[in-house]
Each structure stands twice: as structure tokens, then as C-alpha cells.
Image (spheres, helix red, strand yellow):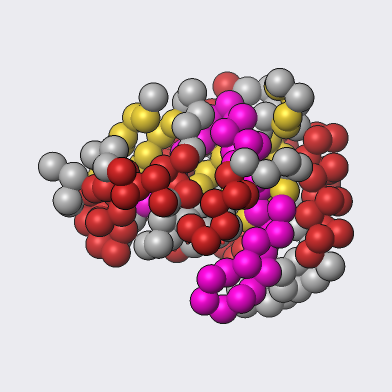
Amino acid sequence: MREVKRFKDNHAVASAFAKYLLSVISSNEVTTIALSGGSTPKLLFKILAEEYADSIPWQKVHFFWGDERCVPPTHEESNYKMTKEFLFDHIGIDPNNIHRVYGESDPEEEAKRYSALISTICHSRQGLPAFDLIILGMGDDGHTASIFPHQMELLDATGNCAVATHPVSGQKRVTLTGPVINNAQEVCFLVTGENKAEKISEIFKDQDSAKAYPASHIHTGKLKWFIDEDAYRLVD
Ligand code: 6PG
């Protein structure tokens, strides 16, 4: 069941989600979280660093990534680098609880290594790792994590992770596969901006065309969409 939480703008989305994160992490013994790249997470990390550095018990969190670009961790496009700069450098977190994708390694080898690591740390349900929380965005082409519309097969792929290719730049990415995303305890989409409005409307109105968008195939039992008015404006 999809739960929709609407807010006036991207800042309100990030603030509301930060508050929600505090409640999730505080109520769990340990929380395994897969992070996302993108503009709204960047804002979220900034808010978490500024307002929640001391109130969230960070030592109870294990951070992973739902997808990573195959670039070194110092590269401008690295999701890890962005998270480090905006969040990790400002909070008390044990480096052993940060599980980055080695974007500098051979992508296929790294997909295997990261798959195994995930299975070691996350608890398992129905033979697959079950993250406590996966944070996702949606691109304006309907992709989520790094599952793009031209690689729908990754929604059913075996293995926890796979190598994906960005449709325009050809950049390789390591991404969680559909079965692992859908096996999470909870998935939260953070979606903001006018350029998402058409796809959001097709998805939320359950139109046939939406089947072509990877984001529409995410259907965990606990599924929340944190969304701003610009992205939601064609739904009503
Ligand atoms: C990535 C992402 C990707 C992102 C969407 C939405 O690393 O590129 O994980 O799936 O979440 O492209 O990005 P925005 O939040 O910037 O719209």
C-alpha cells in the first residue's frame, strides 16, 4: 500500500523525512539503511547535519547505498563523496558502520563483493537481505536507484546487486536489484520538482504507461512517497 505524504517544497520534504528518520532510528535496535544520490537527499543530509547531529543515535545505523556511480570516492559524481561532505563529516559515526560501494573497482567484481557484504550485515527474509529502510529518488525518466527504463530486467535480476548503465552518459553504476528493494522492511521515495510531475501522475493514477517506469514496480508492504507540490501537481 502506497502512502503519500505531500509537502509544499523540497525543503519541507527533506525536513519531514529527517524527523521521520529520527523516529525510525530511535525505535530500532539497529537500522540498516540504503541511501540514494540526488538533489533531495543532499538537502536531507544538510538538514540532518545541522539539526540532528546530536539527537539521532548514529551508532545504531549501518549505511549502505542503493546505487553508486562507478567513479572513485573523491569524484564529484560519487554518491559516497556527497554523503560524506554533507553528512558524515558532521556527525559522530563509526567508519565501520559506513559501507560504501567501491566505485573505483571493476563494476562486475564490485557488484559481487557488495552483494555479499549486504547479506552479511542485513537480516534475511525469504532468502534475501531485508534492509530496514531504503531511501529512493525517481529520475524524470522514471528510473529509481540505477534501474533505468532500458534495463527493466534488473527489476527481476538474481543477486543483490547488478551493474547498470546510464542511458545517456554510458556511465556504469552498481545498483540494488528489484527483488532486494522490494524485500525491504520499508521504502521511502523522496521526489521533488516540476520535472517529475508527468511520471508521478501516470504512476499515481495507475496508468498503463507507468509500467515502463522502474519506480512504479516498487511495492514493498511499507511504501511511503514524500513528495512536493511541484511533483504532485498533475495528480489532483
Ligand atoms: C543517483 C540516484 C537516482 C536519483 C534520481 C533522482 O545516484 O543518480 O540514486 O536514482 O535518486 O535520479 O534524483 P533527484 O533527487 O536529483 O531528482
Q: Residue 96, percent across and down? A: 83, 46
Magenta span includes 155: no
Whether residue 30 sits left or right of residue 54 in the image: it is: right
In the image, 186 versus 163, the foreground residue is 163
Quarter of the figure with the C terminus: top left
The quarter holding residue 33 reads top right
Whether residue 61 sits left or right of residue 9 in the image: it is: right
Residue extending farthest to the left is 236
Q: Residue 234, percent across and down? A: 17, 51
Identified at 65% across, 37% down, the residue is 180
Residue 10 visible? The answer is no
Q: What residue span does the magenta drawing correspond to?
A: 162-191
Question: Relative to 223, does residue 233 appear above or below in the rendering?
Answer: below
Whether residue 221 sits left or right of residue 30 in the image: it is: left
Residue 147 visible? The answer is yes
The quarter holding residue 142 reads bottom left
The quarter holding residue 134 reads top right
Identified at 57% across, 57% down, the residue is 151
Q: Residue 9, percent across and down? A: 26, 54
Q: Residue 78, percent across and down? A: 65, 69
Question: Relative to 83, does residue 122 appear above or below in the rendering?
Answer: above
Quarter of the figure with the N terminus: top left
Disc count in the image?
0
Identified at 37% across, 62% down, the residue is 140
Whether residue 114 sits left or right of residue 218 in the image: it is: right
Magenta span includes 186: yes
